Amino acid sequence: LFKDGDFHNPLENFQVPFWGTVPKGIYFNLCDRRIPVDRNYILEREEAEDFTEFYRKSLRFTDDRRMFIALERFSLAYEKKRFEDNIIDYVIALEALFGTTRNRIGMEIRLKSGFLVEDSKEKITEIYKFMRDLYGLRSKIVHGDEIKIPMKIGKEDYYSEYRLKPAIIKIFREIISAFFDEERRGDKEKIF
C-alpha cells in the first residue's frame, strides 16, 4: 500500500522433483520468475520516514474489522493469478470499506470513494464512473457473463487486465491513504 511494487510471497513455494538420487527435489518460488527487476518492492533509506508515518497512521485501524477485511482482500489479490479473482477481491475490499447496507452497495462504493479521495466535481465524477464500471465488471464475472474487450472502465478503454489492475491498485491506495489521513477523513466523516 505504501508504494508500487511487488514482493516475494513465501506461500508460493512449490517443490520441483528430481529424477536422480535426490528424493525431495528443490524448492522454487514462483515470484522469482514473474516479477521484473524494476517491479521489486524495495524500501529506500530516504523513504523510511514517510513509511514510518504511513505505518503510524495505519495503527489507528488495528481493531477495525472492515479495514482488516479490506486490506486482507487487497493482499489476496496479489497472491491470486486469475484476473477474475483479482477483480472480485478488489471489489470485496471496497465493499468492506464503504458498504453500510446490503442493498445499493455498488452505489455506496461509487459515491463514497469519490467524495473521500477528491474535492472537485469533475474528479469525483471520474472516480464515480470508474467505480460504477468496476462494480459492473465484477457483476459480469460473478454472474458468468462475457467480458468484452476493450473493457470500458470509467473514461478509459482497457484492452488487457495488465493495464486495468494498476489503475485499480492506484485508486485503492489513494482511498486507503485518505482513510489514514485523519484531517481528510474528519472533514468527510458525515459520509461514512
Image (spheres, rainbow, N blue to C red):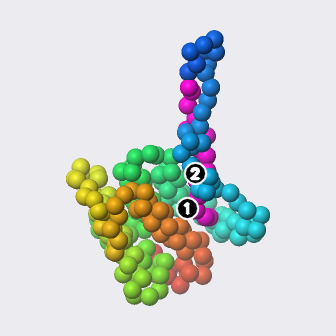
Residue lying at the far top in this picture: please name it.
21
Left or right of residue 122, residue 174 in this image: right
Residue depicted at x 28% and y 51%: 142
The span shown in magenta is 1-16
Residue lying at the far left in this picture: please name it.
145
Which structural element holds mark 1? loop
Q: Mark 1 belongs to which amino acid?
A: Asp
Residue depicted at x 60% and y 82%: 183
Q: Is residue 126 above or below residue 150?
A: below
Within 10 Å of the Cα at label 2, are there few (<14), some (14-19), or many (20+) other Cα atoms? few
Q: Which image quadrant for residue 27?
A: top right
Q: x%, y% of residue 122?
A: 39, 86
The residue labelled by disc 1 is 64
Residue depicted at x 47% and y 69%: 171
Disc 2 vs disc 1: which is toward the camera?
2
Q: Earlier in the sequence, mark 2 or mark 1?
A: 2
Quadrant holding the C terminus: bottom left
Q: Nearer the viewer, residue 35 or 145?
A: 35
Q: Which mark is residue 115?
A: none
